[in-house]
Image (cartoon, coloured by chain):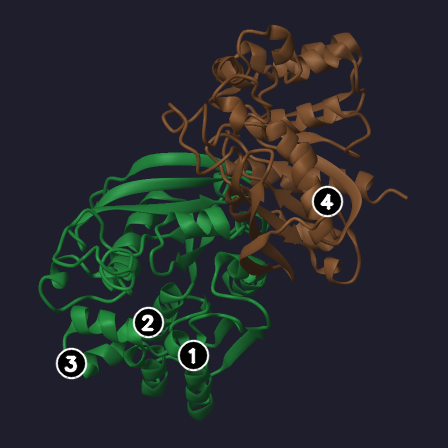
Chain colours: A green, B brown
Amino acid sequence: MAQHAIERVSANKSFGGWVSRFTHYSEVLDCDMTFGIYLPPQAEEERVPLLWWLSGLTCTDENFMQKAGAQKLAAELGIAIICPDTSPRGTDLPGEHERFDFGSGAGFYVNATREPWSRHYRMYDYVTRELPELIREHFPLNGREAISGHSMGGHGALVCALRQPGRYVSVSAFSPVCHPVNCPWGEQAFSHYLGDDRALWAEYDACALIRAGTSRQPLLVEQGEDDNFLDEQLQPGELERTCQECDHELTLNYRPGYDHSYFFVASFIDDHLRYHARYLQAE
Amino acid sequence: MAQHAIERVSANKSFGGWVSRFTHYSEVLDCDMTFGIYLPPQAEEERVPLLWWLSGLTCTDENFMQKAGAQKLAAELGIAIICPDTSPRGTDLPGEHERFDFGSGAGFYVNATREPWSRHYRMYDYVTRELPELIREHFPLNGREAISGHSMGGHGALVCALRQPGRYVSVSAFSPVCHPVNCPWGEQAFSHYLGDDRALWAEYDACALIRAGTSRQPLLVEQGEDDNFLDEQLQPGELERTCQECDHELTLNYRPGYDHSYFFVASFIDDHLRYHARYLQAE
């Protein structure tokens, strides 16, 4: 297989490792994309495991690297972290840049089937197929991968893991959109990207996927109790109910006083890194 | 003394404490200002010590709180952190918003004496007098204060401490502008704010203040070796030489591979918090 070109945009030393940003042409999305990757110091000597981090609405590849404070423990544990962007970039489809919850910065990790979105908005294939192949070519990774994310990216992490049993050794999410087929953000995005076919919507809904029963991988979810989006958009109660009814293992930590921000993510990211490390480093 | 009003803009729970932003009218600067403060969980029960963080060029009160990852250890140690803004805001003086190294976002922690800057640009008095009085009225602080900062703010921290012996229990700096009277950033700013009087410039120059010998407080300085601004703007070698000649205690840590970014600050902020904690918590 031919090497796919990537170009380094920046590199910052961080806790003995490196936070780097790269651009590349994405065939799946038909546009240039940027991603960030943290390589811990161990990556200079050996191949390391990888945590995928999928970000939320309005974010780019940079938010997590700058705000989550994950590098310190990732360096200790020897875990690489990759942060894809949240949508295709550099395109200008009708209405693409008008709303924060749809279009640019809001790809929702689905493969759009409806024109004009289907030309570019294929973030599910990008984060599960094209980008993984690309980074395996370029970085010293050992093939063990976990996945997590925040808000829209928490939804993405749950969906990526539930749809691909065995693909990630562990999955977690912060403040995920648990039931997008039945909340305003999800309805807005899915109706544009996927049209009217509700059966297709269900393929990108954590609760529906749990009911479908394809995967029985345990879920770890962190949720701030003072999150402004809790009841209307995120609906962790629906996830809890679904997991109970389907006997799907779920650890759902409600955190009093915490909101939807990266201050919340930073406060608990070390717990999640240690959780993933147990699976990533299992013999 | 009458209570000076402050208005809360936001509050985010962070490691059991709170990152909050407040606005207030500054008499010294004659404009509305915003600052950020982190109160650790201990502040709900008792008065806590305080670390001042002065930020660098182009920053606001938000950069450190979002990017330095200091809250985790500050919560453990029970230290509050205050982040002032880096210049007056909401004003529109000629040329104020044209350059990144002068005017808005670049107050350099001096009291301007030259028109029109002297009407607003009095950041030294703001961070050493007005803002300290204000926060003592509003927050559960115990009166023990340390100071640190980055780049232009590292310069500010060194100058604030060296000019006021005994005022801060400890002082440190990341990538400070060590000798502003003799570097392009400093010359640009000081000539506008202070005019031609080089004796006045010397009152805001760490190396000149060490030679003047007002304070003999030990200095802790962190410096990335791959910092783009190292030789032309920051000149830690000049600080080292001055401290040697004047027998002024300096710990200057050069860090190979690190640059000028907050990824560098984050990598070593815990070392500085522990350093300040030893002084802030001394019996």
Up/down of A14 relative to A235, above or below:
above
Q: Residue at left 52%, top 63%? A: A276
Could you give the CA–CA distance between mark 4 and mark 3, rounded to whole angstroms?
A: 57 Å
Kind of residue at disc 2: Gln
**Chain of the residue that carries numbered disc 2 in the rendered image:** A
Up/down of A81 relative to B168, above or below:
below
Query: Which x, y percent locates residue A214?
Result: 33, 81
Pointer 2 with pointer 1, Cβ within 8 A: no
Q: Residue at left 60%, top 7%? A: B198
Kind of residue at disc 1: Asp
Pointer 2 with pointer 4, Cβ within 8 A: no
**Chain of the residue that carries numbered disc 4 in the rendered image:** B
Query: Which x, y percent locates residue A20?
Result: 40, 40
Q: Provide the residue designation for mark 1.
A: A231
Q: Provide the residue designation for mark 4.
A: B50
Residue count near mark 1 (Cα–Cα under 10 Å), binned few <14, some 14–19, many ≥20: few
From the image, state whether disc 2 or disc 3 is nearer to you: 3
Could you give the CA–CA distance between mark 2 and mark 3, rounded to whole angstroms?
A: 22 Å
**Which of the numbered marks, if any, corresponds to residue A164?**
2
Earlier-in-chain disc, 3 versus 1: 3
